[in-house]
Amino acid sequence: MKRNDTGAGTVVDLLGARRERRLELYRARAADRLATNRVALETLYQGGTLFSPEGTRQGRALLKARQILQRVNSLIELLAGEGVTPAPRLPERIEEVYEELDTLLSRSDALSGRDEASVAHLPRS
């Protein structure tokens, strides 16, 4: 508990802090995946590999992964209350959105060929 100027205690919203931290973890992972995706696409293009049959397949998979990551960003905006629709309030609905995020990030990782730990392994709030 924090103390304010009058000496009285200040209540800290631990649940809110956990939710903010979780949201920030998802934002960071999404940003990392988008940056990695962009670099992979640029490498395919600049190296000329994009125009080979294998490069074309990889390029399509990376573009599909990018579309999925754009959906991930939309869901993160929804959870943060920054989207067009209001943020979900019911804990069940919030968990449904996080489960969808986990699924989308896993699909994006599979398309991008990432074998690293997924955001799906982050602890729940």
Image (tube, grey):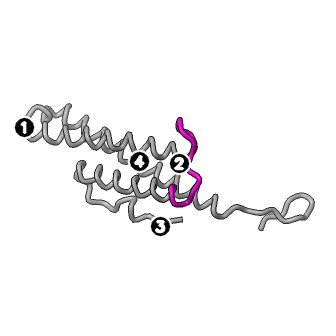
Quadrant of the rendered image containing residue 51:
top left
In the rendered image, which residue does mark 3 sit on? Answer: 123
Quickly name the residue at label 4: 30
Q: Please tell me which residue is depicted at 24% across the width and 48% down the height of the picture.
A: 112
Query: In the rendered image, which residue does mark 2 sit on?
Result: 79
- Alpha-carbon distance for marks 2 and 4? 14 Å
Badge 3: residue crowd in 10 Å (few <14, some 14–19, many ≥20): few
Q: CA distance from mark 4 to mark 3?
A: 17 Å
For marks 4 and 3 on the same chain, the one whose residue lies earlier in the sequence = 4
Secondary structure of the residue carrying tag 2 is: helix
**Circle 1 residue:** 53
29 relative to 68, above or below: below
Residue 121, x across and y down, in percent: 39, 65
What residue appears at the point 20 percent right and 43 percent down from the top-left corner?
Answer: 61
Report the mark closest to the observer, 2 or 3: 2
Residues drawn in magenta: 82-93
Query: Which numbered disc, 1 or 3, marks the residue that appears first in the sequence?
Result: 1
Disc with the residue nearer the chain's start (2 vs 3): 2
Give whichever of 79, 10 is nearer the camera: 79
